Amino acid sequence: AQKITQTQPGMFVQEKEAVTLDCTYDTSDPSYGLFWYKQPSSGEMIFLIYQGSYDQQNATEGRYSLNFQKARKSANLVISASQLGDSAMYFCAMREGGYSTLTFGKGTMLLVSP
Amino acid sequence: GAVVSQHPSWVICKSGTSVKIECRSLDFQATTMFWYRQFPKQSLMLMATSNEGSKATYEQGVEKDKFLINHASLTLSTLTVTSAHPEDSSFYICSATNPSSGGPPNEQFFGPGTRLTVL
């Protein structure tokens, strides 16, 4: 079974609207961390937001928030007020236990239109 | 900060030659570095985990004799693609963990990537 599943290959959103990018995960380890990264066409990986399995509140970072539903094993990224510069590939990734290795999902390509 | 650099940013080589890619942590000491490979429009695939002063741990299916990894210091890891062939053409990304970053546990800081094209 895939550890990280991103079911949306591509998403379109209009500028200034909010968009949700889906991510579900699979782990039996009670301690884990979930990361979202943005990868523009230049290729660099930009860290957006992190949610730890024991964190009581959903993570927020500026226009980014993480809708963490532990029982459903989902960690969706919400981008509010989309901007043209948000057009990029978005990856969800998971770290399990005390290990530092990351498992990445297949990614979602987000296109923001004017 | 936690800045990771890679050199070169892109390289074109002939089939059969070897190519070395450097990954440096510029403002921190990285005990662990990672090497990823990314094909166009696909996800990052972990190739190996590199710990300073010890042999790299390769993921299943990655040829250790073809992709030589050396982590000789706390700020430098190198990936050498030996006898490169066109199918080795890909985007190679390194990352490093900074235990002192104060951010998420085991957060990885990524280099800008190296685009390898083998003719």
Image: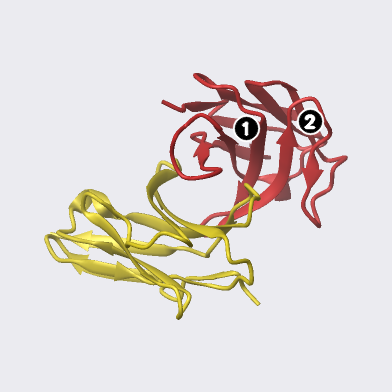
Chain colours: A yellow, B red
What crowding class fits label 2: few (fewer than 14 Cα within 10 Å), some (14-19), or many (20 or more)?
few
Residue at the limit of the structure toward the bottom, as seen here: A72
* Residue placed under numbered mark 1 in the picture: B12
Q: Nearer the viewer, residue B48 or B43?
A: B48
Name the residue at 48% across, 75% down: A73
Q: Looking at the picture, does residue A60 appear above or below residue B83?
A: below
* Residue placed under numbered mark 2 in the picture: B17
Q: Nearer the viewer, residue B44 or B32?
A: B32
Look at the numbered disc 1 and give the secondary structure of its residue.
strand
Q: Residue A51: where, in percent of width, then height?
A: 42, 57
Q: Residue A36: where, in percent of width, then height?
A: 42, 55
Q: Quadrant of residue A69?
A: bottom left
What crowding class fits label 1: few (fewer than 14 Cα within 10 Å), some (14-19), or many (20 or more)?
few
Q: Are marks 1 and 2 on the same chain?
A: yes
Q: In terms of sequence position, does the residue under pointer 1 or pointer 2 come before the other?
A: 1
Q: Quadrant of the C terminus of chain A?
A: bottom left
Q: Residue B48: where, in percent of width, then height?
A: 73, 44
With B118 as the anchor, is A39 left or right in this view? Answer: left
Q: CA distance from mark 1 to mark 2?
A: 10 Å
Q: Nearer the viewer, residue B9 or B94?
A: B94
Look at the numbered disc 2 and give the secondary structure of its residue.
loop
Name the residue at 14% across, 59% down: A81
Give the amino acid at mark 2. Thr
Chain containing the residue with disc 1:
B
Residue at the limit of the structure toward the right, as seen here: B65
Q: Looking at the picture, does residue B110 appear above or below residue A109?
A: above
* Residue B103, label in figure: none
Give the amino acid at mark 1. Ile
Q: Quadrant of the N terminus of chain A?
A: bottom right
